[in-house]
Image: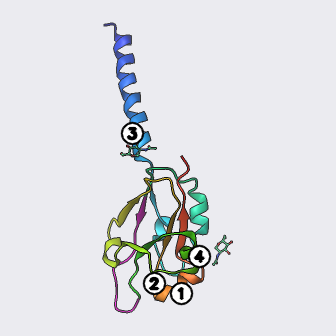
Amino acid sequence: MKASAKVGAVWLVVMACVVTKGMSEGRSIVVGDSQGWRAGTNYTDWAVQNSPFRINDTLVFKYPPPAKWSAAPSVYLMPDLWSFVTCDFKEAKLVGRPTEGSGEGFEFQLNRWQPYYFASADGSGYDCIAGLTKFVATPMN
Ligand SMILES: *[C@@H]1O[C@H](CO)[C@@H](O)[C@H](O)[C@H]1NC(C)=O
Ligand SMILES: *[C@@H]1O[C@H](CO)[C@@H](O)[C@H](O)[C@H]1NC(C)=O
């Protein structure tokens, strides 16, 4: 095999890996960037800046562990738009317990074609009702 053919073959393998990897893994996005997941925070701009979300993108939620003087942070997935808007946590699924956000945080992969409604139930849901510490991520591809 000539040297150029070898280089070509190696290049093909590398490209195949890049394409495969790109298709299945998606981005890893820290929710709220360096601020992380915080009470009383508006995530609208963050969500707009990181849109469009794609299938297999991974959201990383980071928040401090529970402390005596503050409500325990957590992450809920709301079942539908109505419960998201009205902050009805009855059918909500707890996806991040208060202790799970410390250090590297925890990961949530967007692996379905559906809107994902995230909200915090901090402070009896007052943040949620005020439109804070909540966002929708809808994978587009
Ligand atoms: C998402 O990841 C799964 C499992 O790794 C993979 O089978 C699927 O093809 C990926 N989907 C996209 C659109 O990349
Ligand atoms: C959040 O920020 C967006 C865009 O800056 C703004 O339109 C919206 O009114 C804000 N929401 C709240 C509850 O402050």
Q: Is residue 24 above or below residue 91?
A: above
Q: Amino acid at mark 1?
A: Tyr
Instruction: Locate the N terminus and report the quarter of the image it occupies.
Output: top left
Q: Residue at x 34, y 78 (%)?
A: 98
Residues under labels 3 and 4: Cα distance? 36 Å
Q: Residue at x 54, y 76 (%)?
A: 83
Judging by the rendered image, the residue that carries numbered circle 3 is 21
Judging by the rendered image, the residue that carries numbered circle 4 is 85
Give the percent coordinates (x, y) of residue 72: 38, 84
Verify whether residue 84 appears in magenta.
Answer: no
In terms of image quadrants, where is residue 109?
bottom left
Q: Secondary structure at mark 3?
A: helix
Residue 126 shows which numbered tag? 1
Which residue is situated farthest in the bottom direction here? Answer: 69
Residue at mark 1: C-beta within 8 A of ligand 2? no
Q: From the image, state whether disc 2 or disc 4 is nearer to you.
A: 4
Residues under labels 1 and 3: Cα distance? 41 Å
Towards the viewer: 99 or 24: 24
Give the percent coordinates (x, y) of residue 66: 34, 83
Q: Secondary structure at mark 2?
A: helix
For label 2, count other residues whose C-alpha is less than 10 Å away and answer few (under 14), some (14-19) or many (20+). some
| Number of marks present in the image shown | 4
Q: Is residue 85 left or right of residue 76?
A: right
Q: From the image, state whether disc 1 or disc 4 is nearer to you.
A: 4
Q: Amino acid at mark 3?
A: Lys
- Residue range highlighted in magenta: 59-70
Residues under labels 2 and 4: Cα distance? 16 Å
